[in-house]
Image (cartoon, rainbow, N blue to C red):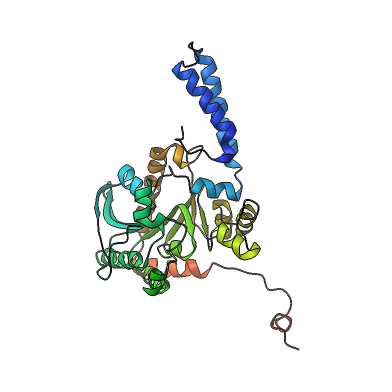
Amino acid sequence: MAGTTRLPFETDIYELEDLLLKLETGSEGQAEPSEKIRKIRRELAQLKKHKYANLTAWETVLVSRHPERPQTMDYVRMAFDDFVELHGDRAFGDDRAIRCGFARMGDQRFLLVGHQKGHTLNERRECMYGCAHPEGYRKAIKNMRLAAKYGLPIVSLIDTPGAFPGIGSEERGVAHLIASALLEMSQYPTPIICVVIGEGGSGGALGIGIGDRVAILEHAYYSVISPEGCAGILWKVANEQTKPLAADALKFTSASLKSFGIVDDVISEPIGGAHRDPKGMATTLKQYLTRSIRELKEFAPEALVQARYDKFRRMGSFDRVGSAKQSTGTA
């Protein structure tokens, strides 16, 4: 069952969960027949399945931001072995919003790069809520170069509302560092797998998002802008009316991204979301990463780089309406 944070659209799920807990613990004053408990469990599973199969875009955003949703360092603990964290960018400092380190899954060794938001208030302040500064991307580039040098695959876990937009971040060249990361990731002669595990917001997400395989968890989102930012631009205010409208318009859910060819795979989450079964989600993610690394290792480095280039060049298809003369506005 989920923890203390309750999403507004799940009232009926919480009511059934609370009733089931009372029946299972006997807090109602008497033990209930096991058949009644089994019936409620079935109803609860069906309700979660139906609810999460029909989430709106804004509800998906709320799930992706759930405080108990597994983050990069949670997956390190649950899915990876022998993690050795690498600190610092050799220029300014150690950005805690992006974590890097060597890790292992069975016999597969790789470099992990991922956003970390933090769970407690102190952790979130340390990690700037997952919003990386220039030194975070510089650290990622430094370590990805090292992985490419020794032929190690790179795994990128994306979970950020965007890069940190403060004055210091701009002064230290965050846009330039993100652009450099895009360029370098497009050229590394080693397998790169990127997975959006929660929020995938703007250039902050794309900065570690160029890969041979780009996947997204079922209830995550990946967008050029957050729904709040979009609502603020279009309607000058981000409130309970405009944020869902922006979320619907952006088409950033996993199903839409798959249909547009932006992501290669959608990774299923446990019923009710990853926050309800973190270990189950970690197992599924580990299986996907292990399989993907094994498949990509079959390709020669030159073929990987060329296929990666072709993959991103195919994105952004459009329809041309009218003649060339009409479209250019010439007489």
Residue 232 placement, left or right of 204 = right
Residue 218 visible? The answer is: no
| Residue 79 point in image, percent of width and height | 33, 44
The C terminus lies in quadrant:
bottom right
Residue 260 placement, left or right of 197 = right
Q: How many marks overall?
A: 0
Residue 102 placement, left or right of 3 = left
| Residue 106 point in image, percent of width and height | 27, 46
Please, which residue is most extreme toward the top here? 30
Quarter of the image for residue 275 reads: top left
At horizontal 45% and vertical 70% (from top left) the residue drawn is 309
At horizontal 72% and vertical 73% (from top left) the residue drawn is 321
Closer to the camera in the image, 272 or 153: 272
Please, which residue is most extreme toward the bottom here? 331
Residue 313 visible? The answer is: yes
| Residue 221 point in image, percent of width and height | 52, 53
Q: Is residue 13 above or below residue 256?
A: above
Q: Is residue 23 above or below residue 277?
A: above
At horizontal 38% and vertical 68% (from top left) the residue drawn is 185
| Residue 30 point in image, percent of width and height | 49, 10
Q: Is residue 269 above or below residue 244?
A: above
Residue 175 placement, left or right of 259 = left
Closer to the camera in the image, 46 or 204: 204
